[in-house]
Each structure stands twice: as C-alpha cells, then as structure tokens.
Image (cartoon, coloured by chain):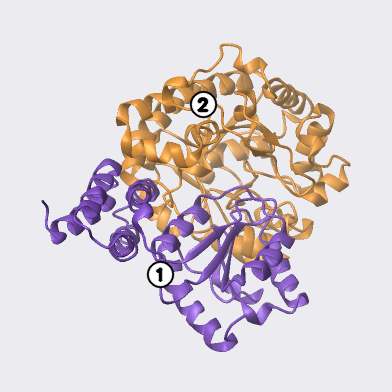
Amino acid sequence: MATKEEIVNGFIKAIVDGDEAASAKWAKEGVAANLDAYELVTKHGGDAMSIVNSKYERKEFFVPEVLCSANALNAGVDVLAPHMKSDKTSEPATVILGVVEGDIHDIGKNLVKIMLSAAGFKVVDLGKDVPLAQFIEKTKELKADVIGMSALMSTTMPSMKKVIGMLQDAGIRNKVKVIVGGGPVTKEWALSIGADDRPHDASAAVGVTKDLVAKVRAERGAW
Amino acid sequence: MGEMTPRKRALLCVTGNKRKADRISCLDTLTTCTVDQMNAVKAPFPEANRDPELAFRLAAAAWEVVGLEGFKMPFDLCVEAEALGCKINWGRIDRHPSVESHVFADLKDLKIPEDILDRGRFRMKHDVELRLMKEYGDYLPVANQVTGPFTIAGHIFGIEKFCIWTKKRPLEEVKEALMTISEMNIADCKRALRSGAEIICIADPSATSDILSPAFFRDVMVPVYKNMSRKIGAPIILHICGNTSAYLPYMPDTGFDALSVDAQVDIGFAKAIVGNKIAIVGGVPTITALLFGTPQKVREAAIDAIKKGVDVLMPSCGIPPRTPLENFKALVEVARCMVYQ
C-alpha cells in the first residue's frame, strides 16, 4: 500500500496536471489508507490549487489548464466527500458570488468560485444574470461575510454600484464586505463605487477574501 | 491621387498606409451603437438588431449622428450562433443580444448547414450593407463584421467546455473545428464583399490572452486566421479583447492588415513589436475615456494614441451603449484636425 506521503504527493500532482482519473485514483488510495478526507481536500487540495494559482500568475498556466485542474480537484472531492467528517471547529466563511443582471459572461466568476471553494470557503453561487435584489436577500438569509460581483461588460458595471447602494438602504452594508471583478472593472473604479476591493484575478481573490473575512468578523462580530 | 474621400482614407489607414492619406481615419468597426444614436434616428435596440429598416438607420447613424467615417454591420456578435441554432437573449435598449444556449455537445457534432447564409440574420446583414453601399458607397466604406471562430466555438459548444478540449483533445481536432467554423466566416465575407462591403472586421473577443496561451494562439489560431486572410481577399481588421500583448510577435503571421487592440495594450509597445508588418488600430479606452470620461479626456486619449503611432483612431473595444454622444464626437474631432501634410 502507498504511504501517506506518496498519496498526498500523487493527489497534488494529479490536480496540478489536470488529470481527473489520477486524482480519483489517489483519493481512493487515501480512503483505503484511512487518511483524513477533509484534510486531503482542504489542505492538500488547497495546496495543489495554490500551485495552480502561482503557475497562472507566472503565465505558465492559462484558463484551460486552470479549468482542467479544477475538474481534477472535483473528481477527487467526489470520491472523498462521503468520507468527510463535518465536525469542523470554526464555521467557514460564507461568500456569495454572482454575475450581475444583464451580464452572462461567467467564466471569471466560475474561476473565483473554484479557487475560493478549494481554499475552504462556503461559496454560494447565484449564477449569472442575477437580479440585483437577490444579492441583498441572499446576504441577509445566509448571513454572508463577503459578496463577490462580476461584470464582463462595461454596460453592466453600473449594476455593482446599485447593489452597494441597496446594501446601504437595507442597513447591512457594514455587515458584509464587497469585492468586484471582471475585465473592464478597474480597482480605481471599484473603490470609487464603495466596494472594498478588486482582486486582480481569480487567484488573488483567495488572499483578498481571507483578509476581508478577518476584517468583517472583527468589525461586526456575529451577524 | 485625386480627391481624398473618407473611403479612400479609411482603406489607406486600415492597410497601414496612413502616410499616403491626408490625415488619420476615424471609424469604428466594432460595436458602434449608443443609446444617443438610437434615440436620434428612432431605431432602438433590441428591435434594430432584427428589423432591416431600423438596422439601416442605426448603421447610418455612425456617420449621420457621430461623424464616424465608415459603417459597420451587424451590431452584435450573435448572428452566427443564432443561425446555427443557439437561443438568443435579445437584450434591451442598452444591452446587446447574447447567446443563451449551446447547440453541440461534442466536437464531432459540429456541422455547418450548407444553406447557413440563408438562415437567421445573415441575409438581413448583407441587404443592409448593400443599401449602405448604394447610398454612401462612393464616399464612405462599409465594413462587414464576423464573429471570430474561437468566440463562435464558445457560443456553440460552451466556452468552458471548449477551453478544456484545447487541453484534453488532440490539438488537430480542435484546430479542425475552428477551421470548419472559419469557412462559414469566409463564405459570409465573400457574400458581403459582393454586397459592397470593403473592409472585414473579425471580432474574436474570446480568443484573448486572458484565456488562451500565446502558444495556443501561435499553433492553432494563427493557422486558422491565415486560412481566412488567404481566402477572403479584402482588408481585414482583427479585434481581440483584453491584453493581447503576448500575441503581438505572431500577429503579422496572420496575414491580416490590422489588429484592433483593447485598452490594456500600449499602442507604442504594440507598434514597437509589430513594426510596419501589421497596422495597429483602436487605442481610445472605452471605459475610462468614452463612457465615464469627458470630451477633454477623450481628446487627450486620442492624441496620445496618435502620438504613439496608431493607424486608425477607434474605440479600444465595443462602445458601451450609454456612452455620451459628445464624448464619441470628440474622437472624430481629433481625427479631423490631425493633418499630415
């Protein structure tokens, strides 16, 4: 039987290589060897996605490679999920993601979702062409920590500003942090509409979200 | 050389011969329509995308209302996907039509019907181009826009699926699918050229280096584009959204006349890489200058682009429908007062 080290390294390599079959195979080995399934997914799967992130940042990987790695991670998660114990000590942060109304370009948002999920966030994906009021309703309902909005068309960018105004009107702007993204969205513009940050790409979204969660939880306490 | 017309000027500038023109050309072969133009000629979206009379009026508004020195059809990027059977969301006055559903589950399923140019809105597009040519053709050029092969692949297969296939399927199969799609583009362009169009614009927004590697661009996209440039036989502008800097070394190999670059690409940098091998057009940022800026900001951006050697003054990407008319007009004004001789 493979050692823990071999399994972990095999699993990480399979994800980085975007090899679904190998990822599922190493996940099964992990189950057979009684490894902690939760740790295998969040820690080692997360490590693998960090490697993918840095390769993406260094322009060694592009979107197709990232999508293949995400699929490989998911193949491993499918095997491991039934074996994951849910007795986690700290409540994972909740992030709501969506492409604003009028916009159906969701590849960027999907990448952010993959990255955040792998990093252990509870990600609720509202999909694309999301009616603006739904961001507010879901934020309240799920007691979200961070909202991530995406727009890939300059024509739909103003909707992000509207959502921030709606959060203010609902009296919950100080309970949640807002990040925005998408091709035409600049950091300067994001800050001018009152968003908290604009991560420069999907991989940067992980660090930014972690920081914002820590900040909002310190400022706000519980919802 | 006889009298210089906007048509002659555009053809010279698009093909990299701006020094032979009296001044730089200012046209827009990307999305030209704004709400201000729609209101001015009473031809609003979404109807103007499908009604030939409204489409003619809105296309003509590029010159009649804004002063742009040329026309372009159609206004959206869904003509091909629609004709192939994708469901289209027709949008509203300030929202372009978009593709809602894909039609092919696998590369093997791709089939372009023989009568494709008689489906959907191809006929309407060519009819409007013919009418523009008849009414303005001796003075202003008509551009026929096609959606590029990679973007169409994203529409008909789903962009994520197609991206994954670029890694998981033999590259030859992926290239072959794109070649098949490009043949539809070529047939479209040939008919458009017979209808009086004189410039071709290939809008391939999804083929951006934000998504694809420069190696994929070089090994797959360049041969597909080369197939198009060899067979179309007219001045061709390629537009790709986002940062295309990493593609620049391979651009001259496409055989295209001009590359339209988005705001993320520095015009001076692009010119330094491609030299005189392919014209660089665009250069005026759609978001910071045209949509959210002022006429003064547009003028400054336009002058900056000219200083850096841009060959045709054009918005850097599709114009957002809510762009104020006075900002758009400021672009044309700059071109009008830049005289070489």
Which of the chains bears the disc numbered 1? A
The answer to whether residue B20 is seen in the rendering is yes
Q: Amino acid at mark 2?
A: Phe
Same chain for marks 2 and 1?
A: no
Q: Which residue is mark 2?
A: B104
Callout 1: few (<14), some (14-19), or many (20+) C-alpha neighbours within 10 Å?
Answer: few
Q: Which chain is purple?
A: A
The picture places residue B212, in percent across and down from the top left corner, at 39, 46
At label 1, the amino acid type is Asp
* Up/down of B41 relative to B246, above or below: above
Q: Where is residue B108? Give x, y as percent.
A: 42, 21
Q: Secondary structure at mark 1?
A: loop
Q: Split into 4 quadrants, where in the image is the C terminus of chain A?
A: bottom right
Residue closer to the observer: A195 or B151: A195
Q: Nearer the viewer, mark 2 or mark 1?
A: 1
The residue nearer to you, when weighing B263 against A142, is A142
- The foreground one among A82 and B73 is A82
Query: Which residue lies at the image location 43% right of the left edge and 48% below the top edge?
Result: B211
Q: Residue at x 12, y 53 (%)?
A: A2
Q: Nearer the viewer, residue A114 or B178?
A: A114
Q: Which chain is orange?
A: B
Mark 2 Cα shell of 10 Å, populated few (<14), some (14-19), many (≥20) = some
Q: Position of residue B1 (x, y in %)?
A: 60, 34
The answer to whether residue B267 shows anywhere in this view is: no
Tag on residue A17? none
The residue singled out by tag 1 in the image is A87
A84 vs A210: above or below:
above
A119 to the left or right of B187: left
Tell me: residue A145, above or below residue B283.
below
